[in-house]
Image (tube, grey):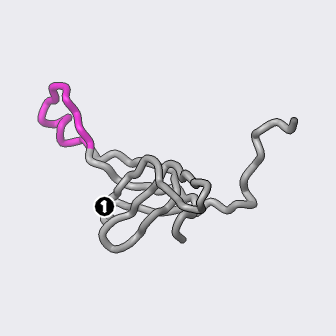
Amino acid sequence: MEDELVQVTWEDAGFENSCQLPEDAKKLTPLVRHNVGYLVKKDDHETILAFGIINDNEGGTTYDGLLVIPAKMVLRINKYNKPDYVELTPKI
């Protein structure tokens, strides 16, 4: 599954910096995030996404923009299938 394009849905810590009454503060919940990227790593400890892949002229790969998500925060990972891609670039 490495380097596949995926969407990771995960729970992140929430933060509220405005004044809150105790009853309102108790209603705060974690944030549910959705991030799309290339799956670099997934194991029992973490999921790592890259927001870009750079290929050099010698066949090497560099990842661009990495996000590390603790495994226990991941709700689900959805794989994007290449046949579902739609060409958005106009033909010249």
Q: Is residue 15 magenta?
A: yes
**Residue farthest toward the top in the current orientation of the protein:** 19
**Residue farthest toward the right in the current orientation of the protein:** 92
**Residue farthest toward the bottom in the current orientation of the protein:** 44
Q: Which residues are magenta?
A: 14-28
- Work out whether 55 lies above or below 29: below
Type of amino acid under label 1: Pro
Q: Where in the figure is residue 26, as x and y percent of width and height?
A: 18, 42
Residue occupying the point 34% across, 53% down: 11
Q: Which residue is mark 1?
A: 70
Residue occupying the point 52% across, 68% down: 2
Indicate the quadrant containing the N terminus: top left, top right, bottom left or bottom right.
bottom right
Q: Nearer the viewer, residue 63 or 50?
A: 63
Q: Quadrant of residue 9?
A: bottom left
Q: Where in the figure is residue 74, as x and y percent of width and height?
A: 38, 61
Residue occupying the point 49% across, 49% down: 51
Indicate the quadrant containing the C terminus: top left, top right, bottom left or bottom right.
top right
Q: Nearer the viewer, residue 43 or 27?
A: 43
Assign a secondary structure to mark 1. Answer: strand
10 Å crowding of disc 1: few (<14), some (14-19), many (20+): some
Q: Where in the figure is residue 31, as x and y percent of width and height?
A: 34, 45
Q: Where in the figure is residue 30, as x and y percent of width and height?
A: 29, 47
Is residue 1 shown left or right of residue 90? left
Q: Is residue 11 magenta?
A: no
Magenta portion: prevailing SS class: loop
Residue occupying the point 12% across, 35% down: 22
- Work out whether 21 lies above or below 33: above
